[in-house]
């Protein structure tokens, strides 16, 4: 009996010791997960101040959307922005518009109503801020090849990581289709035709290194509309897109591609909407 009692105490002590070690191990794993999360930096525009923004249908847009030489920065991220000589903008702006209706017959048409997203707000909900981009057409300037040196200033839709101390690799982003593009594809408009079987509308995302070289042989491609095999539904929600294959990046460059073309140019409105861009600190 003494032996059994001693053995029982020993086993209990062993169980307690093992439990402590297990808990310590779990705590270490939790710390590691926490550290990984701490290394992920998100371009979070959910609290972007639009109180003094320009009025837009269903909300407001960044106050400097139509102001030349304005910088759009969110944390460590710089979003390209430019204003043309005729007063139009390219690159990125911020909007909280909850409007996702078809403006083909509205007064002024789509131009004053270009600031929505089909989900009616950012990834945080209806009426929350998100990014709108007017981007370049894919392949208009030729294929970009891995290792090729490029001038990112040539392109409209570019995100730069401003942090000069740390290095980052691309992680993920949420993307959604713009109402102007959506209704152009669905019904056609004054420029675009209705999509049929074989058509698609896609975004291509390239990584660019600190020495201005393309990081991968292929971009990340996401299809907003994919009728290549059959006419189907078009997603009107935020879609998670994995960017990890782009590797270490200093810049991300975005291009849009449509199968609806005339004289080498896309007829589909070259807009997309974006939220929660994430990079991971190396």
Image: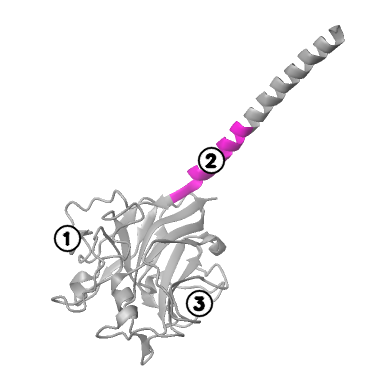
**Which image quarter is the N terminus in?**
top right
Task: Say which mark, if any, is on residue 240.
Answer: none
Residue depicted at 24% across the width and 50% down the height: 49
Q: Quadrant of residue 239?
A: bottom left
Neighbour class for label 1 at 10 Å: few (<14), some, many (≥20)? some
197 or 58: nearer the viewer = 197
Q: Is residue 148 left or right of residue 55?
A: right
Picture layout, residue 221 above or below residue 1 = below
Q: Which residues are magenta?
A: 26-41
As helix, strand or loop, the secondary structure at mark 1 comes to strand
Q: Which residue is mark 2?
A: 35
9 inside magenta stretch: no
Neighbour class for label 2 at 10 Å: few (<14), some, many (≥20)? few
Q: Which residue is mark 3?
A: 144
First in sequence: mark 3 vs mark 1: 1
The answer to whether the residues at label 1 and label 2 have Cβ atoms under 8 Å apart is no
As helix, strand or loop, the secondary structure at mark 2 comes to helix
215 or 234: nearer the viewer = 234
Q: What is the residue that sits farthest to the top in this orientation?
A: 2
CA–CA distance in space, label 3 to label 2? 35 Å
Picture layout, residue 7 above or below residue 181 = above
Q: Position of residue 147 (x, y in %)?
A: 56, 72
Between marks 3 and 2 in the image, the one whose residue lies nearer the viewer: 2
Task: Say which mark, if any, is on residue 54.
Answer: 1
Q: Position of residue 227 (x, y in %)?
A: 45, 80
Q: Quadrant of residue 89?
A: bottom left
As helix, strand or loop, the secondary structure at mark 3 comes to loop
35 inside magenta stretch: yes
């Amino acid at each position: 009996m003494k032996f059994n009692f001693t053995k029982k105490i020993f086993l209990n002590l062993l169980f307690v010791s093992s439990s402590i070690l297990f808990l310590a191990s779990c705590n270490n794993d939790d710390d590691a997960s926490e550290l990984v999360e701490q290394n992920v930096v998100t371009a979070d525009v959910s609290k972007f101040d639009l109180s003094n923004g320009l009025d837009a249908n269903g909300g407001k847009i960044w106050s400097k959307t139509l102001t030349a030489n304005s910088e759009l920065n969110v944390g460590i991220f710089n979003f390209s922005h430019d204003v043309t000589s005729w007063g139009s903008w390219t690159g990125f702006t911020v909007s909280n518009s909850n409007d996702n209706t078809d403006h083909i017959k509205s007064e002024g048409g789509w131009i004053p109503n270009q600031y929505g997203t089909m989900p009616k707000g950012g990834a945080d909900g209806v009426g929350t801020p998100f990014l709108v981009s007017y981007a370049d057409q894919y392949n208009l300037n030729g294929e970009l090849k891995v290792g090729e040196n490029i001038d990112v200033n040539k392109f409209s839709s570019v995100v730069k990581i401003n942090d000069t101390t740390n290095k980052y690799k691309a992680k993920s982003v949420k993307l959604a289709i713009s109402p102007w593009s959506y209704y152009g594809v669905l019904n056609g408009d004054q420029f675009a035709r209705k999509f049929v079987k074989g058509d698609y509308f896609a975004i291509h995302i390239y990584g660019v290194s600190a020495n201005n070289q393309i990081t991968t042989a292929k971009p990340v491609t996401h299809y907003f509309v994919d009728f290549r095999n059959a006419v189907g539904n078009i997603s009107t929600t935020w879609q998670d897109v994995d960017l990890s294959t782009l590797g270490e990046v200093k810049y991300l460059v975005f291009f849009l591609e449509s199968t609806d073309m005339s004289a080498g140019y896309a007829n589909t409105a070259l807009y997309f909407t974006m939220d929660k861009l994430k990079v991971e600190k190396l």
